[in-house]
Image (cartoon, rainbow, N blue to C red):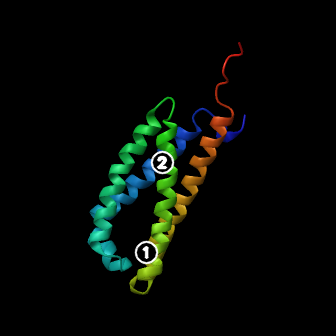
């Protein structure tokens, strides 16, 4: 059995997703004005995405707590993580000249983390489908 086909693999990846989003969201809410000055990112953007990340972290934690993670929801998470990474790159493309170097690092780190998580989630979905329960022969 591969690592990705482990019964707990998707739950563990969703838990990692929840923890990373909770940490990032909390930092953006608690230190939003400091982060805005340091990164050059707009404070309202940091606040709004911080709230979203905390709400998402709760949903991801719920998915991680399931004995059988909800495959369709995790499929949506994969798409959402890829969309988040694209949005990060889009932000840098559109407003990159007004964002300080630490802001570039903050945004690129988020893009990288969600890409890694999306890939792990996708691989977990693919392997659990391929090795999931087989129908009984008649």
Task: Locate residue 80, reporting x and y percent.
Answer: 46, 55
Q: What element carries label 1?
A: helix
Assign the N terminus to one quadrant of the image. Answer: top right
Residue 57 visible in the snapshot: yes
Residue bearing mark 1: 91
Residue in view at x 68 percent, y 40 percent: 3
Sequence-wise, the earlier of marks 1 and 2 is: 2
Asked if residue 119 lies left or right of residue 105, the reply is: right
| Image quadrant assignment for residue 95 | bottom left
* Count of numbered circles in the view: 2
Q: How crowded is mark 2: few (under 14 residues within 10 Å), some or many (20 or more)?
A: few
Mark 2 — residue? 76
* Picture residue at 52% right of the left edge, 59% below the top: 82
Q: Nearer the viewer, mark 1 or mark 2?
A: 2
Q: Which of 115 and 29 is in front in this view?
A: 115
> At numbered mark 2, what does the secondary structure look like: helix, strand or loop?
helix
């Amino acid at each position: 059995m591969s690592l990705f086909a482990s019964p707990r693999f998707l739950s563990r990846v969703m838990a990692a997703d929840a923890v990373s989003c909770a940490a990032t969201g909390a930092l953006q809410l608690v230190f939003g004005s400091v982060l805005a000055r340091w990164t050059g990112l707009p404070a309202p953007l940091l606040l709004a995405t911080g709230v979203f990340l905390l709400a998402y972290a709760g949903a991801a934690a719920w998915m991680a707590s399931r004995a059988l993670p909800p495959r369709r929801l995790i499929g949506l998470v994969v798409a959402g993580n890829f969309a988040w990474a694209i949005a990060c790159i889009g932000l840098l493309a559109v407003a990159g000249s007004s964002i300080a170097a630490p802001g570039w690092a903050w945004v690129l780190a988020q893009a990288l983390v969600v890409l890694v998580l999306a890939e792990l989630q996708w691989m977990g979905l693919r392997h659990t489908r391929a090795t999931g329960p087989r129908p009984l022969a008649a």
